[in-house]
Amino acid sequence: MSNPVPSSSRAGRFLVTGEGTQREDYAPLDWTLLGSISLIWGASFLFIAVGLRSLAPGVIASARVLLGAGALMLFPAARRAIAPVDRSRVVLIGIVSQAAPALLFALAEERIESALAGMMVSATPILTAILMTAITRRLPGRVQQVGLLVGFAGVIALTLPSLSGAGGSALGVFYVVIAISGYAFANVLYPPLQQSYGALPVIMWALIAASVLLLPLGILGLADSSFEWGPVLAIVALGVVGTGLARAMHMTLIGRVGPNRGAIAGYSIPVIALILGVVFLDETVKLVQLGGVVLVLAGSYLVSRKEEVSSRGASG
């Protein structure tokens, strides 16, 4: 079992990461967290697309982080103070994984289809593994390496039919790449912070920092927005559930199982998007996509297995 890095040990290093506290096979709680996160985030890109029908990107970005912070404030555990040594890391998380993606995804979905944006998020586990390897000088376990590759192959199979007909622009794709890079970077920073404070206060304070940053854009965007119940309710759901609660659940999962194993939620998003398309939009499923679902599930299972790591502690 891995212990969090003490605050005194983090004082001299800004970029600090760590392993999860639960290195065995995924426990029922881990599967529950992963399934909940995947379901919520699989629908989030649809909510953004609905919101853009009457709300400007700045309004969507500002509203979702404000709503997420407000939802978490209702939990007494979220109001725990963060030690001074860690506050800059929490602010950084708020910038790179809350403020920037909230704005960038809204801007991106003005230029590319929501399905394409959601599918691109599936690159997050690979980016997380690359960053973890660069920082810790240690590769994921062999089983996890195979699982990451199998899952990524499954995502490619899932997305090929959609990508071939998806409209978009290079700028929209660039926005998504920057956003998911921020997600991967935050995944690396999560473990010691989650293990020291719990997920609720870290995500809440990060969302507050993001809210301060995005509020001017939200105010400016009101002039280009109009009130319609459908878009407004979609953004309320996106903020409270997708930005607040789901972010806290994801950080909890990464604190438990580590960045490499916790990031596989990104592989599940195309599967959820595919299911939602079949159920609500009468879309058809191609044979290659069924094969992709099998590969994604197999890859996720492999990544969830017991991780063999060296005895080194958290690295920075």
Image: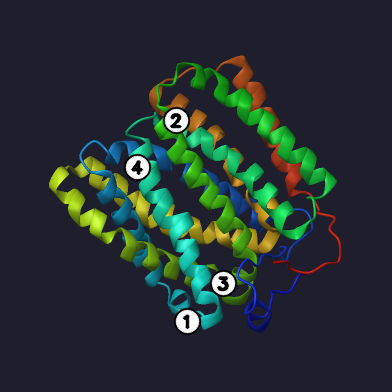
Residue identified by numbered label 2:
115
Circles 3 and 1, Cβ within 8 Å, touching? The answer is: no
Q: Residues within 10 Å of mark 4 (few under 14, many from 20)?
A: many
Query: From mark 2 to mark 1, how far is it between C-alphas?
Result: 38 Å
Query: From mark 4 to mark 3, how far is it between C-alphas?
Result: 29 Å
Residue type of the residue flagged with mark 4:
Ala
Query: From mark 4 to mark 2, how far is it between C-alphas?
Result: 13 Å
Residue at figure coordinates x 64%, y 58% from the top left: 29
Residue 106: image tag: 4
Instruction: Decide which of tag 4 and tag 1 comes sooner along the chain.
Output: 1
Residue type of the residue flagged with mark 1:
Ala
Viewer-side label of 4, 1? 4
Residue identified by numbered label 3:
198
Residue identified by numbered label 1:
81
Q: In the image, is 215 to the left or to the right of 170? A: left
Circles 2 and 1, Cβ within 8 Å, touching? The answer is: no
Vertical side of 211 occupied by 285: above or below = above
- Residue 285 in which image quadrant: top right
